[in-house]
Image: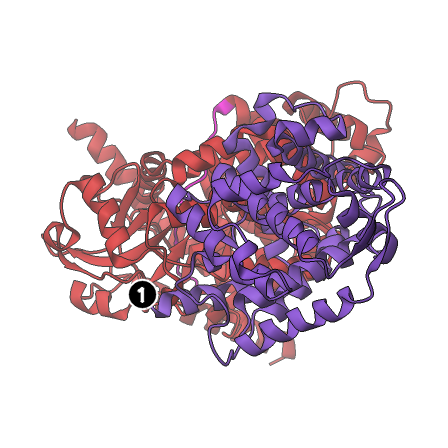
Amino acid sequence: MDTARLSPLEPLARAFQRAVPEHPADDGLFGRRSIVWRVNRDRSFPLAGMRSLMVQALHPLAMAGVAQHSNWRQDPFGRLAATSSYLLTTTYGDTVSALAAAAWVRKIHVHVRGTDAVTGLAYSAEDPALLLWVHAGMVDSVVTVAQRYGRPLSSEDADRYVAEMVRFAEIVGVPRDDVPTTVQALRGYIESVGLRQATPAARDAIQTVLDPPEIEEDDMRQLWRDLGQVAVGTLPDWARDMYGFQAPPPELMERESVRQLLGALDLAFEGLPGVLEARQRIELRIRATE
Amino acid sequence: MSAATAAMRQSRISRGAALARLALRIGGRYVARSPKLLFASVEHRAELRHDLAYRSADEVAEELGSMKGVLMKLGQMASYIYDDMPLTFRAAMSRLQHRAAPMTPELAASVIREELGGEPEQLFREWDPLPFAAASIGQVHRAITRDGRAVAVKVQYPGIARSITSDLRNVGLLRRVVGAAFPGLDTRSFVDEVSDRLREEVDYVREAGSQEVFARYYDGHPVIRVPHVVPELSTARVLTSELVSGSSFDDLLTWDQHERDLAAETIHRFVFRSLYRLHAFNGDPHPGNYLFHGDGRVTFLDFGLTKMFTEADLNPLIDAVRCLVFEKDYEAFRAALEQAGFLKPGAPVPTQLVVDRFGQFYGTVLQDAPMTITPAYASAIVRRFFDARGPLAPYSDVPREYVIMQRINLGLYALLGSLNATANWRRIAEEIWPFRNGPPSTPIGEAEARWEATRASTTLEKVIKN
């Protein structure tokens, strides 16, 4: 709650404020009636974000691209803010801003290529197969976490979300027809990927996510660790086994107490300049159609 | 005529004029206005965001459940008392508090239906579907009852009582969040205090009972007014009381210093009198809980946190005041503090340190002279309250019986400080302390003495009649 000590959240707040325009030219890629607009601002999103990273890192080539090309270690919360900004701009920004953000990402991806030391395989961030993996890891995490800890999301709406998010994959270069359109198809795809493993780079990165050195204060650290443990608890067994994580105790995973943890985090975030106002802009746009 | 005599005469004249004004009001203090006019005079406050009104219990839960409401309240309290609070945090708290989304008319009506068993339009002759004010866990509608009384109907958000109760059970998380947000604060006593407060606040039946205790006691008082509860239209989640219209604290701040001094005197009298005569303390010195009517007349609202004291609770406090202020017996003062539990017995600290440290809380009554409570004085007092660092810190404590009272004192100082109020607080206190029974020291004091005399005789009459 103390903004001075929660500075890690500040880049996220700035990203959020900028990504939600005050005078959008249009309703962007999804529109105010979309399920994407509803789910992508769910309070459970930080947890979904953590889980996404844990799943995405289990593809050695995706992980190698990040480990070899990203500056995330110098500025993990800045990196997180950039990703979050991209997601929010493509969700709530107008069409021009959304496509410009996607074009920028594709431009950066051109240079992200190399060889993974563990598997010896060459990779490129433009590879639709890698992009699809990253996409699936995120969408599956959002659905899993939202259904468990977010506002009620029916299985029909969850499928609708997955189907609407196809557009999200498409704009960074995944052929439309390759992207799963239901929750079941999405999970089927993830489990069909043969190259899954936890490389040393992945373990190292996830350790940092679970216990970021940026958080110095004891109480805050403990809150963050609890959140990480909940994220671990939402992983599929195979993913947890690859990392060698234990399933957390069931009482830690209980919906009410997790929502309380998320509520505390959400209030801290909402207290930062611009966040409440940006949320209200989204809310008012959605209400205007009803 | 010397200058001094002229000044004396002048002061006697203005005193006489003030007395005359007060006398005019007694009896017809709050000029009986038609309910219709009163209803119309209560304005909708601007801070309510009707465009973002909650449409369902789910939306309320999303915005205020899962710790958010509890932590906002906690932040609000901490912002009164936490010394090192960064400005950004203060700004954040004030932004969050000002968002005040009301319920939609349909949602508010659904609560009325569940609680009172009918549509608001049937239960009341007139019902304003838009609330005129926000309450911490609800909102306030104006209405006219079927028997023609103008009333304020406080309607609680649906589901909020259950979710707050559940959030308060997660003490571990609350303490950790508070610890993260306010390092150095005694998180245990602070969280316990706020938890108690919130648990009580969600029960409007309890609040109605407390409010009525105050309302009856102050009936007919020249400057203090507490609206009566309408019991047949009140339940655990709906609290209906007399509608009062008046000026806000912000308005008061624009009035002249004389008006501000009078208002401050009345607030001071209310707190002292409630504690020492009624043995009750009302715990929310939030500026929004007062309405000002000029000439020192104040209406007190919101009795969500009231504590009744026993003689045993009060006696050590009275002993402490008597020993420190009048008898100057510092060892006895120390013993009284030890008996009340503020200080551990046998603490290895000199008594002079105890007097210096605790004496600060008696600053307004130590001297028999006019004193101005400045904002700086108020914040100095407040700063010492949850001080976990001073030399007495390891040995001092706020016993649970007095936690609420301490809070009110702190809030009160902050309030009087922002009014820059001047008075001979000691003389006023002496009127009220039961062991002094001092003579009236101000025009308000004289009016109060007359009220008390009538009050005593009517009470006696009632006793005789029964």
Provide the secondary structure element on which disc 1 rests: loop
Q: Residues within 10 Å of mark 1 (few under 14, many from 20)?
A: few
Using residue B215 as the reference point, say whether residue A212 is left or right of it: right
Quadrant of residue A90 in the image? bottom right
Which chain is the one coloured red?
A: B
B145 and B212: which is toward the camera: B145
Tell me which residue sits at (45%, 60%) in the image. B443
Quadrant of residue B88 in the image? bottom right
Q: Which percent across, then down, holds residue B320?
A: 65, 31
Residue B289 among magenta residues:
no
Tell me which residue sits at (65%, 41%) in the image. A51
Q: Which percent across, then down, holds residue A264?
A: 60, 44
Query: For mark 1, what is the residue?
Result: A290
Residue B300 among magenta residues:
yes
Q: Which percent across, then down, holds residue B125?
A: 11, 57
**Bounds of the magenta segment:** B295-311
